[in-house]
Image (cartoon, coloured by chain):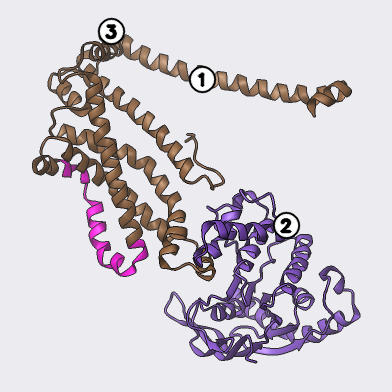
Amino acid sequence: MAPAIQLRRVTKRFLTPKGGVYTAIRDLSLQVAPGEFCALVGPTGSGKSTTLALISGLEPPSEGEVEVFGKPVTGVGHNIGYVFQADAVFPWKSVLDNVAAGPRYRGASKREARERAQDWISRVGLAGFEDRYPHQLSGGMRKRVALAQTLINSPEVLLMDEPFSALDVQTRTLMENELLQLWAASSASVVFVTHDLEEAIALADRVYVLTAGPATVKGNYVVDLPRPRNVAEIRFQPRFDEIYQEIWSDLRDEVLVSYERQKRIGAA
Amino acid sequence: MSVRSASALPEAAAAPERAGGRRALAARRRRLMVNGLRLLVLVVWIGSWELTTRIGLVDKFFFGMPSGIVQRLWTWITEGTALGPLWEQVLVTMEETVLGFLVGSVLGIILGIALGRNRLLADVLSPYIKAANSIPRVVLGALFAISLGLDLKSKVATASILVFFVVFFNAFQGVREVDRNLVANARILGADGRRLTTEVIIPSALSWIAASLHISFGLALVGAVVGELFGATEGVGELIYNAKNNFDANGVFAGMALLAVVALVAESLITALESRLIKWRPNPVTDVAI
């Protein structure tokens, strides 16, 4: 069976406003099996978000191949879901219409879209908030809207860009558990970008460590912790610590490289 | 809750209630004071104007006098103006203003969004638009009076050209400032180009456009009145123009007062429209506090 996501020796360069060339990703190869939950960790500015943009089709690669279910990516695919780091729910739409947006754009009737949205709103625990506008919700509730808005399209590939980084610790653990439950009920392959190694291990089947930018894969680790998991408790298992130590020794070097580089830029 | 606690725990409940009552009282007192002072400013201003013109310190021939202005308005209301009944003049000016406002803002919104969405078109047209924006467009009223005649059309044209540029630049900027995350999100969710425009670009540009509508209604009124000054047979601007020709300062001031009333009424209508258009916004502009 073809892997759900395959990146082969992918390079992505951007033009900087001053006319220079910035290489975000160099020679990056990775693959995600169907139904696999995969986490990307790396120091800040290591091209993690760019990797997601390439898989989603929002950006084309400069070199190399990006394939989703064996087909090369050309433009935004219909089977992709993407939860952004920043708030990306539509501020002028109510919760109901935000969640119903996907089905509406994909040709469902208004009534059908709203019925399905209603169902997803209850699934993410927002029943009763259908008529609210995003600015009337807390950060955690807005993330739930974003999750429902994405999952209602039943994506086969779910991309998440540090979705919970802006939340407080308690809300975050809660959301992580809910994400695992929702994912278990689907068959989606997930690429979850984070800079938090604990979060990566708690959630994922496999963790990719990226190097300080330009990003390439430093190593990949299988997380053989049993499922279903409780994110709040899994951190106390001895096996969690072992995996953490193993990955951290790799990640630490990259974090130091990135830190030194930032210090140098700051000093210059 | 306050009822229950008031009967069960009279001592404990009374204290915060008293504090709340004191605060409400203080707020009411402050409001009274502000309104009183406002009235005082008006009385001093009008009173000193009336007084200085009455005793001859200021020439009432050039500066008019409040009682004369009120008298002029009263004659206009009861006996009509030289151009016909007063309400007809106000109605004509309103019609020109509203039509100019509608034509100018619709064209401004459509072209602003079109140019905001189309990079090539924007690059090609931008020097011409900048040039057109830099000339004092009010003088076009003279041109319109020649080419379109002395009736409604020339005033609507003058008003709409003033409105157009303000709304156009705001719509254009609004489209350019759209949050890229929202666009990316809509594309991922399955929006095509048309949906992207109607569902993301326009709603997000709307708060920019709505802000410009406030200013541009005032400009539409300016355009209509200036158009009338350049040549007309009726309207408040023509009333002012006639008064000027008769060296009637009171008439000029009376016309200005009429225009102020029209502008204030329109302003409140626009504010109501704005809060309807962007009811999702956290802090809709309900009152301009200065």
Q: Among all residues in the image, which is located at the extreme top?
A: B55
- Circle 2 residues within 10 Å: few <14, some 14–19, many ≥20: some
Asked whether residue B210 appears in the rendered view, the answer is: yes
Circle 1: element type: helix
Residue B21 horizontal side relative to residue A235, left or right:
left
Amino acid at dot 3: Arg
Structural distance between the alpha carbons of marks 1 and 2 = 49 Å
Left or right of A214 in this view: A203: right
Q: Amino acid at mark 2?
A: Gly
Q: Amino acid at mark 1?
A: Asn
Q: Residue at x 20, y 24 (%)?
A: B240
* Residue A109 versus residue A221 in the image, above or below: above
Numbered disc 3: secondary structure: helix
| Number of the label disc, if any, that sits on residue B205 | none
Looking at the image, is mark 2 or mark 3 nearer the viewer?
Answer: 2
Q: Which residues are magenta?
A: B115-141
Q: Which chain appears purple?
A: A
